[in-house]
Amino acid sequence: METKSSWTDTGRDCPYCGGEIMLRLDQLPDGSQSKYHQCRVCEAQWTIKWDSVRSGKGDKILKQKPSAGRVEPLPQMPRWVWITLALMVGLILIRFGGASLLRVAILPLLVVFMGWLLYRLGRDQGWWHS
Ligand SMILES: [Zn+2]
């Protein structure tokens, strides 16, 4: 026999990830029942009296302060978006720049621009974060 679980919404939000906490009722093979609260998202668990049993899956909560509550991660641009953007800006400058001065200046400008993009990307991705 298998364990049957039924889930009921408790209306509470998980303090770790902000997900919905459900009341989980397990019907065990030996006929007994076990009841506890469980987050649907990170699988953190609490007893019926809301004593913490375990926190959720580490990879979903470790980067977040416990008091932070519901925090959406910043959308992260894939690297090719930045590279395409830099190339397009470069092409536009070459195509419409015209003036020879601009053509001379384009390489250092591109280097500075790419450096700035890399800096932004690195900061967003946390390459050197703490
Ligand atoms: Zn959770």
Image (tube, rainbow, N blue to C red):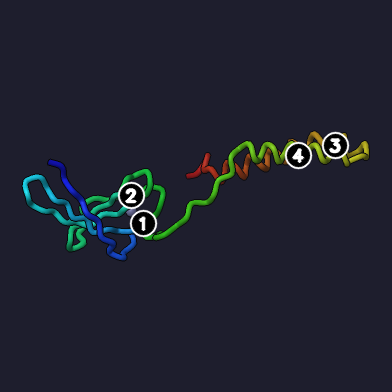
Q: Earlier in the sequence, mark 3 or mark 4?
A: 4
Q: List x then y, in percent, for residue 95.
A: 86, 38
Q: Would you say the beta carbon of the disc 2 residue lies within 8 angstroms of ligand 1?
A: yes
- Marks 1 and 3 in Cβ contact (< 8 Å): no
Q: Amino acid at mark 2?
A: Cys
Mark 4 crowd level (few <14, some 14–19, many ≥20, 10 Å Cα) = few
Q: Residue at x 48, y 51 (%)?
A: 73
Tag shown at residue 88: 4
CB within 8 Å, label 1 to label 2? yes
**In front of the other: 92 or 27:** 27
Circle 2 — which element?
A: loop
The disc at residue 94 is 3
Q: Secondary structure at mark 3?
A: helix
User: Looking at the picture, which amino acid does disc 3 mark?
Assistant: Ile
* Residue 40: numbered disc: none
Q: Within 8 Å of ligand 1, the CB of disc 1? A: yes
State the residue position of label 1. Answer: 19
